[in-house]
Amino acid sequence: MTDKTPIHLTSKTTSIHGHIGAIGDASILRAAFTAGAPITLDGKFAGERVYLGHTRQIYGDYGITLETLGLDRELGESPAHPGVQGAVYLIDLTRLDDAPRLAALVRETETKTYRAAAAAEQRAAEAEDRYLNDEEY
């Protein structure tokens, strides 16, 4: 038996739509994010190591700046682990070298998203062509 609180993946993030996060002990996740250290996942991706944080560009009065988001949300005390505060931290999807199965899933999801967007764009272009070529126009 282990005293370690497991760290799993979740797709239920609130700060970045469609992103994934690590859900687990808030103190462990906060320490890893602050130190820039990887965490080891449990569950479906057990043994894979990921880094925390999502960096995005912010366009403002002073030009383009980078902002790294770590904490997605705090969850309060874990019902399964009394005394442990839970949290969700965003996963750094640019640093998945030590998480090959997760990297493959991310690539597959991105490919499906790009294909769906390209298909939608093609349908829109075809509809526009039909409209512009309509003799009643």
Image (cartoon, rainbow, N blue to C red):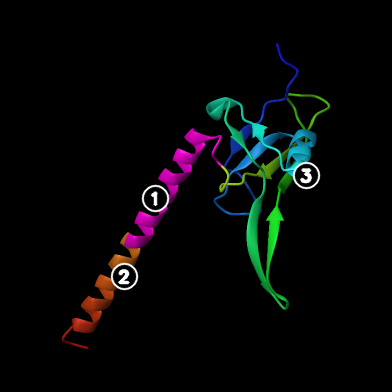
**Mark 2: secondary structure:** helix
Please name the residue shown 73% across and 76% down the image: 62
- Residue 105 belongs to magenta span: yes
Residue type, mark 2 in image: Ala
Residue placed furthest toward the bottom? 137
What mark, if any, has residue 34 been given in the picture?
Answer: 3
**Mark 1: secondary structure:** helix
Residue placed furthest toward the right? 83
Please name the residue shown 64% across and 38% down the image: 22
> Dot 2: few (<14), some (14–19), or many (≥20) neighbours within 10 Å?
few
Please name the residue shown 69% across and 41% down the image: 88
Quadrant of the image occupied by residue 83: top right
Residue placed furthest toward the top? 1
Relative to 28, residue 4 above or below: above
Q: Which residues are magenta?
A: 96-118
Residue 92, percent across and down?
Answer: 61, 46
Residue 137, percent across and down?
Answer: 22, 88
Question: Mark 1 — residue?
Answer: 111
Question: Mark 2 — residue?
Answer: 124
Residue type, mark 3 in image: Thr
Residue placed furthest toward the front? 97
